[in-house]
Image (cartoon, rainbow, N blue to C red):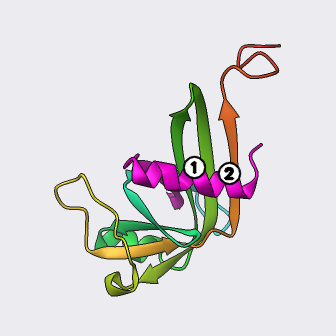
Amino acid sequence: MLGVPECRRLLAVGAREHRPGHLGFTSEPMPGLSGDSAPTAPTVLPVDYALWGPDVVVQVGEGLFRHIAGRLVAFQVDGVENGRAWSVLVRGPAVPTEPEAVPQLPVPRVAKPGARLVRIRSDVVTGRRLGAGPAGGLGAR
């Protein structure tokens, strides 16, 4: 497991390198189930991101914005540094944000990224390195 300072550094590396991240949230009740206790299905979408202090900022369309604003979401970005893969996960509420408040906006690579910004508050930040290490890597048993 990586410490929070290292996770924040890697988030910055990923933003600087324009690595896509993944936005995870719960969507609709699972098919075939009904009632108030029906579990919701997770959805994960690729997104471009920027950092605003310790938080992640993503640009989304109006429909997704209405669905996630104020709700708990997860954001993950992966990369490779010095031959070792890494992955960082941020969890927190998706807070509606005005573009003029954000010093650096995400650089979207999709034709119509949407016009709404959401700041993912970094309440929980975790990460890990993958691949060959002291224990022999992913395949070691």
Task: Give left or right: position of 115 versus 105.
Answer: left
Residue that appears at 34% across and 70% down: 105
User: Taking the image as drawn, is residue 30 in sight?
Assistant: no
User: Taking the image as drawn, is residue 53 in sight?
Assistant: yes
Can you say whether 138 is above or below 121 in the image? above
Q: What span is colored magenta in the figure?
A: 1-30
Residue 54 image position (x, y, % from top left): 59, 69
Residue that appears at 25% across and 68% down: 114
Residue 128 image position (x, y, % from top left): 70, 40
Disc 1: which residue: 10
Between residue 66 and residue 50, name the one nearer to us: 50
Mark on residue 6?
A: 2
Residue type at the position of mark 2: Glu
Can you say whether 14 is above or below 5 in the image? above
Residue 5 image position (x, y, % from top left): 70, 57
Can you say whether 123 is above or below 83 in the image? below
Marks 1 and 2: CB-CB under 8 Å? yes
Can you say whether 72 is above or below 27 in the image? below
Residue 101 belongs to the span the image colors magenta = no
